[in-house]
Amino acid sequence: MQKNEIRAVYTQESIRVYQAYSHEIADEALRLGTFGNKFSMDRMTWIKPSFLWMMYRCGWGTKDNQERILAIDIKRSAFDYIVQNAVISSYKEELGMSHSQWKEQVHNSDIRCQWDPERDIFGNPLEYRSIQLGLRGQAVHSYVNDWILKMEDITGYVKELYEKRNAGVDITDLLPQEKIYSL
C-alpha cells in the first residue's frame, strides 16, 4: 500500500501551492495579488503543494486553460487548517464511519482532500501519494481574501524545465526543493 506524504516548499510562515489557469485569470490574479472577477468563487478550486503532481495535472502548462502556472504562497496556519478540516473525496470503509455519514460530511464541508500517486518528471507514478486540496464556499473566500501571501508566475521556468526534460537533460536538481511537511 502506498503511503501518503505532503511534500512542499515552505518556511516558518508560508507553504507554496500550485495552480494552473488561463492567461486571463492568471494576468488578473498577478495584477491584483489575489484572484479577481475572472476567477469563479462558485466552484471548487484545487491547490497542490507538489510541483511534479501539478506538472502532471496541467501537462507542464500545455493543456487548454492551464497554460499559466502560478506558485502561490499561503499562510502555514491556513494550510494546516485546510488539511485538518478536509473531508476525503472518496469513501473507504477504513474511515470508520458509514457511507451515509461520510456523504453528510462531504455535503457539509467546504474542503476536500484527495491523495493521488506522486509523479516523476515523466509523469510516471511513484511509491507515495501526494495531497491535493479542494476549496469551495467559505474556504475559497478565505483563500482568496485572507490566506494568500504572494503569487508568482512560474510559467517561463516550467517551459524551460519541460524543454530541457524533452531534450534528455536530467532536470532533477532544477526542481523546487520540496521537503516532507508535517502538521
Image (cartoon, rainbow, N blue to C red):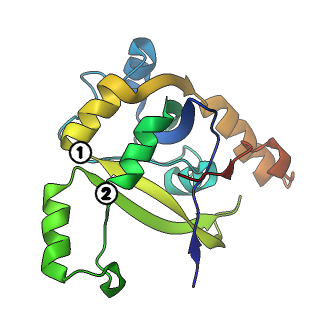
Q: Is residue 4 above or below residue 15?
A: below
* Residue at 72%, 42% in the rendered image: 176
Q: Which mark is residue 136?
A: 1
Question: Measured from the top left, where is residue 43 in percent x and y?
Answer: 21, 44
Q: Left or right: where does residue 102 sit relative to residue 158?
A: left
* Residue at 58%, 53% in the rendered image: 182
Instruction: Pick the quarter of the image with the N terminus.
Output: bottom right
In the image, 99 versus 25, the foreground residue is 99
Q: Is residue 103 above or below residue 112?
A: below
Cβ atoms under marks 1 and 2 closer than 8 Å: yes
**Residue 35 seen in the figure:** no
Which is nearer the N-term, disc 1 or disc 2? 2
Please, which residue is most extreme toward the top here? Answer: 31
Q: Left or right: where does residue 163 sit relative to residue 39?
A: right
Tell me how far mark 1 sits from mark 2, CA to CA: 9 Å
* Residue at 22%, 49% in the rendered image: 110
Q: Left or right: where does residue 132 sit relative to residue 181?
A: left
**Residue 154 seen in the figure:** yes
Q: Amino acid at mark 1?
A: Arg
Q: Amino acid at mark 2?
A: Arg
Circle 1 crowding by C-alpha within 10 Å: few under 14, some 14–19, many from 20: many
Q: Residue beneath label 2, please?
A: 112
Q: Is residue 117 above or below residue 43?
A: below
Question: Measured from the top left, where is residue 103 in percent x and y?
Answer: 16, 71
> Helix, strand or loop at disc 1?
loop
Residue 61 placement: quadrant? top right
